[in-house]
Amino acid sequence: MNRRDSLKSLVFGSIGVGVLLEGCVSGVDNETVANSLKKFNYGRTPKEKEYDKLLFSKKCFTNNQMTLISKISNLILPPNEFGSINDAEVPELIEFMAKDIPSYETPLKEGLVALNQNSNEKFKKVFIDCDESQQKSILDLMAYPDPDLSSSEQSEDVKWFSLFRNLTMTGYYTSKVGIEELGYKGNTPNVWDGVPQDVLDQYGLSYDQDWLDKCVDQTKRNDVAEWDEQGNLIT
Amino acid sequence: MQIKENSKEYDVIIVGSGAGGGMASKILSEAGLKIAIVEAGPFYDPANPDQMTQMKWAYDSPRRGAGTTRPFGDFDQAYGGWDIEGEPYSQKGDTEFRWFRSRMLGGRTNHWGRISLRFGPEDFKKKSIDGLGEDWPIGYDDIKPYYDKVDKLIGVFGSKENLYNDPDGFFLPPPKPRLHELFYIKGARKSSVKVMPSRLSILTKRINNERGVCFYCRQCARSCSVYADFSAGSCLIFPAQDNGGQIDLYVNSMVRTVTTNEEGKATGVSFINKEDKTEYKLKAKVVVLAASACSSARILLNSKSKQHPNGLGNSSDVVGKYLHDSTGGGRMAFLPELVDRKIYNEDGVGGMHVYSPWWLDNKNLNFPRGYHIEVWGGMGAPSYGSGFNVNDLNKFFGIKVGGYGDMLRTDMRKYYGTVLGMDGRGESIAMESNYCEIDPEKVDEFGVPILRFNYKWSNHEVNQAKHMQDTFEEIIHNMGGIALGNKPGKDRNYGLTKPGEIIHEVGTTRMGSDPKTSVVNEFEQLHDVSNVFVVDAGPFVSQADKNPTWTIMALAWRTSDYIVDQFKKQNF
């Protein structure tokens, strides 16, 4: 029997997405929205898909702001042999998160304005037109939180840069290139059979024999389990 | 409003398709009864590629897996959450109850932790031990045969430990511990805290030819596409259908009331189809509620009639009362020894490979009930949030925190997989004063009156939470770790979670032999109405320091056997 035959009512629900994206404007063309929806294929419900569509159809930053975001992210994590901030689509992620978590939007934008004010005061130029040493001299003033203050007590500049650094770092290390650089080895079918011996040796650890005796014999994982009456596994 | 009536009469209508509803569907349909399952959410199959999230990477999501849409992240398989648009609940006074609902076939079994613990002999008779709460009308020996059957049908790994109150079962073999779990074992043993292999319903070994075997991706919260973990759809409802069970599924259907006749007997249910917002009626000889403890209580309380003016099954005025959730507390630690550790695949199963059952005697403590400890950590898949505060741990080495440039990539690598955490999950005392009731003023988007919660922890739970924090700190010290963040003090209830947050809410239709002080009898049958049963966690008299799912299913099986027997005796 086909499972779906038993369905008496299959619904793709209507939705009212109650999100306010005040500073974000529409203006993304339908084709781009459709491509974005197609690109991210991750098991959404119809309602969730509609929410994503709404976010994809809004633009949170101007092109100039996006260029600036890309520049800052590249200063935070310069490109290397694995890839770059742009390969990792970090600016796109920052833009998306400013819509997905609306409380990010204003602080992110204000920080960009403040950055240009800083560079104008110091070098009579917007940040993007400064040379790299000038740009770094500006970042140096906001990149190090005061260790004696809690995160909410830090200056606005420091708070903004921390948020920006967090988004940049997470954007890079959750991307294909970033995951490869980190060297994460999982998310693939395999058979776990304990900590490698050289790692155990490194930490001076070992498995207790009586514990190991209880553990799965991976050579018999495909034999259907059977027990005796006392619950002892016999296969 | 027009109400559409279906002329077909089922033998049994089951409301909800999670652990209890799934089990009832399987046993009752395989006994030849005609079943309707009425589920508030959509159809869901973990193997359906359109719904699947297993094996996705963070970058498959535009928010890299962040928890803005689904509370436990984009890939978690629970359609719903703490707050569902159009389906609110309210609080009385300063109550902060949190109610997690998952609207989909299989309900919360699609994303749960698979921690599958039997209650022990003492767990059914706690009042006899410490004078608090109430004893169950049944004991371990009544339910043991059903635990055995659940183990063999569904599969749970674990080990024989011969602990009186943590009974062994028919186990599949457990996986070997991960590195941070070996550190935990070392630290816990120094504190004389018992550690043993965890007990999770994940197939480390084949259990039948229909379901796959675990391939160690650590993603059980995403529901396994080869059915190597327990979900009610993949392990109960689909197999029942494949075995020829006559099951009609009504999805996206929110049950409003149990309908009754002049004699006060149940005749079926009325539900609202979320698609056309129309109310429908279904008829059956027996109604089995399995909508989750609070939802089932809500349905009963909303089912008022001339014969049942206080709500169905509520002549005792006990429906909704004795609501209780597990306590929770946690602490994170940094293990300096693991800095710059070698990277290898240590995903393992979806959850811990080791845990600590309650190891002390409450006679010597200032709180009456115990807790178990869960452990997490290791080199997990990067997801939204990975890389936040990348070098905060520098402060423990006297190095500057913050900065930018290539040094951040060194920091990222250095601290990857160096943090672990412990979570305590404990038993609270069921109290009459903690309850859910119908809010007299508010309705949901379907016009159904909503629940209002009243809940306050007592010193029993607060003192237990303090003990958790002291224990965590000691174990962290013993394994050479550094506890992170500030230890929560009295002002923060020692880190005690809000009621509901552990998602083990139980007790709202409690079981007992006295119809004046309980809602259902030992077969989860309403004292007031013989053809209505409750097979979720509502009938739990007490919670135990165990997770409720295995007991929900053992009881649901026992109840289903009783229902089949009553059908044979033509009592419905």
Image: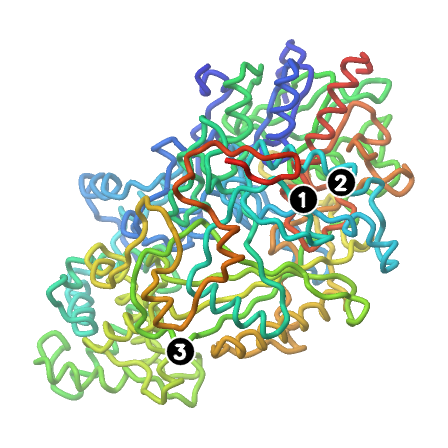
Tag 3 residue: B336
Which comes sooner in the sequence, label 3 or label 2? 3
Quadrant occupied by the N terminus of chain B: top right
| Residue B400 numbered mark, or none | none
- Secondary structure under badge 1? strand
Q: Quadrant of residue A206?
A: bottom left
> Is residue B2 visible to us here?
no
Q: Are callouts 1 and 2 both on one chain?
A: yes
Q: Please tell me how crowded label 3 is: few (under 14), some (14-19), or many (20+) other residues with Cα within 10 Å.
A: some
Label 3 residue SS: helix
Q: Nearer the viewer, mark 3 or mark 1?
A: 3
Residue A50: give x, y in percent of width and height. Answer: 36, 40
Residue for point 10% across, 80% down = A132
Q: Earlier in the sequence, mark 1 or mark 2?
A: 1
Callouts 3 and 2 in the same chain:
yes
Q: Residues within 10 Å of mark 2 (few under 14, many from 20)?
A: many
- Residue that carries the numbered disc 1 in the rendered image: B442
Res A151 → quadrant: bottom left
Q: Chain of mark 3?
A: B
Q: Given this view, does label 1 or label 2 mark the residue nearer the observer?
A: 2
Sequence order check, earlier mark of 3 and 1: 3
Is the residue at mark 3 from the same chain as the one at mark 1? Answer: yes
| Residue closer to the observer: A63 or B218 | B218
Task: Name the amino acid type tagged 2.
Answer: Pro
Q: Where residue B219 sits in the image (x, y, percent)?
A: 41, 47
Eye-nearest disc, 3 or 2: 3
Distance from Cα at disc 1 to Cα at disc 2: 26 Å
Q: Residue at point 42% right, 64% down?
A: B179
Residue type of the residue flagged with mark 3: Pro
Label 2, on which residue? Answer: B539
Q: Are marks 3 and 1 in contact (CB under 8 Å)?
A: no
